[in-house]
Each structure stands twice: as structure tokens, then as C-alpha cells.
Image (cartoon, rainbow, N blue to C red):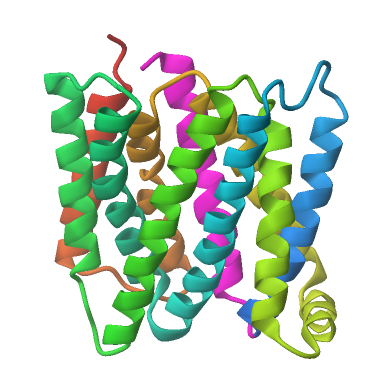
Amino acid sequence: MQPLVAALIIVSAFLHALWNAALKLQPDREGAAVAILVIAIAVSAAALGTQDGPAFPATTGLLWALAAGVCEGGYLVTLVLGFREAPLGVVYPIARGGAVAMVWPASALWLGEAITARSAAGAVAVSTGLVLVGIERRGSTSVRGVFWASLCALFIAGYHLCYKCALATGAVPSAVFLAALAVALPVNVVRLGNGGWARTLAALRTSPLVIAAAGVLCATSFLVFLSALSRGGAGAAATLRNTSVVFALLLAWLIGERPGRAQVIGTLGVALGAVLLGWPR
């Protein structure tokens, strides 16, 4: 993986952890999630307006982007449900680590991504570190919280692979993300049920600046990541992006959660794996 690509993914990881932490702090996370999606759509549309050429040179690119949107919708629903049952410092690493375990084999077998000894060691280090962080279970963590985080991992793996397939057709990253959000938004609105838009507006009125910032961070983190993904393999990109667990652990500490020994050791494992994956060939 090239140094620039690795740097873009790490920046994306930090922004991703930041907006997740902001969502965790909201009293009505379901309503806030929809508000964040709406703002992210506006940012993505603005980014697409600066691009030249066709957004989707091939119809298959659009179809993969829409499939990614289904996964994005499921990801946000399960993320919110996980946050309802467990701390940020537990849900986040389980979701991200589980995605790594699913994306790497699929990327190698399906997309033909080469796996070197160093990249394999990096993936193992990151995955092991994430598992250690995730097993730090406390009284505030329920079986349901772990279940939702694990299901969230499945959706994360799904959108990573779908995004990679969409970008492989030459689709513009901002167009891919915008199409995905166009699917993810109604999924989450339906999840709110009757009065969903009223809850969204109420959540926005409660924390307008935080939610607006979270929406911008959400869009920016994904657009930066998709730009990097278009230049690198899905397995390496997905694994390196999961260094966001390091940032999430620090943010969890700032909002009052206290990491245990396993979480600290796991974080060091993630950092080591990131170096191995991001080191130039």
C-alpha cells in the first residue's frame, strides 16, 4: 500500500471514530442518525458537483453502489442498537474487528487481492488487537450489545466489498457514496416509524452544532476512504481503516469510559498491524 493511500485511510479512520462518538452522546440516537445522514447527503452532493465526467461509466457501478447503500442502512441501524446496549469502547471494536475477519478472505478469494507475509501479519495483528479490545466486557455490556455489534460487522464488511466493486467500474467516489446514502436514508427513516421526521428535527434542535458537525465528518470520512479505496485493495484498506478503534478508545475515555488492560494491549496490537499494513512495498 502506498504511503499516501495509507495516510488517507488513517485520516478517514479518525474522522469516522469522531462522528461515531458524537452519535453515541445523543439522547435520541435513532433520530440523530437520520439527521446525520441528511447532512452527509448534502455534503456528498456538493462534492459530486465539483466532479467532471460521468458519475457511473457502467450500470454495474450504480448497482454495486445501491447494494452498498443497503449495507450502509443496516450498519447504521445495528450501530445505534449496539450503542443502546453497550459502551462505545466495546461496540466499536467488535464491529470493526468482525468486519476485518470477513473482508480479508473475501477480498483475496473474490477480488484477487494479493496477500503478502507482511500484510497477512498486519491483518492478524489488527484483528487480534480488536478482539482483545472487544472482550473487555463489563457490567454495562449485554449479550444483546455484542450481538448487535457483531451484526453491524457483517454490514460493514458488505459495504466495503460493494464499494470496492463499484469503484472498480470507474465510478466517481462521491457519486458512489451519494447513491448509497439515498438507499440508507429511507431504511433508517422506516426504522423510526411514525413521527420519524419529527424525532429527527427534535434531535437536530437538541444538538444542532454537534449533529451538523457529525454529518460533515461522516461524509468526509467516507469520501476520503473511498478515494483511498479506489487506489488500493479492499482487504488492506478495510483493515487499516480499523485503526479507528485506537481513536475510538481515546474518545471513549474522554466521554467517561475507562479502558481495561485488555483494551490497552489490543490498541497496541492495532497500531502494530497498521504499521505493517501501511508500510510501503
In the image: residue 142, left or right of residue 129? right
Residue 163 is situated, as x and y percent measured from the top left of the image, at 53, 37
Between 188 and 80, the one lying in front of the other is 188
Name the quadrant of the C terminus.
top left
- The residue shown at (53%, 22%) is 168
Tell me how many marks there are: 0
> In this view of the protein, can residue 268 be seen by the observer?
no
Would you identify the image quadrant in which residue 61 lies?
Answer: top right
Q: Tell whether position 24 is magenta.
A: yes
* Range of magenta residues: 1-27
Q: Residue furthest top?
A: 281
Q: Tell whether position 39 is magenta.
A: no
Residue 140 is situated, as x and y percent measured from the top left of the image, at 32, 88
> In this view of the protein, can residue 193 be seen by the observer?
yes
Up/down of 152 relative to 8, above or below: below
Name the quadrant of the N terminus.
top left
- The residue shown at (81%, 74%) is 204
In the image: residue 251, left or right of residue 43? left
- The residue shown at (62%, 19%) is 170
In the image: residue 9, left or right of residue 66? left
Up/down of 193 relative to 89, above or below: below
Residue 126 is situated, as x and y percent measured from the top left of the image, at 23, 43
Dominant secondary structure of the residues highlighted in magenta in the image: helix
Between 253 and 96, the one lying in front of the other is 96
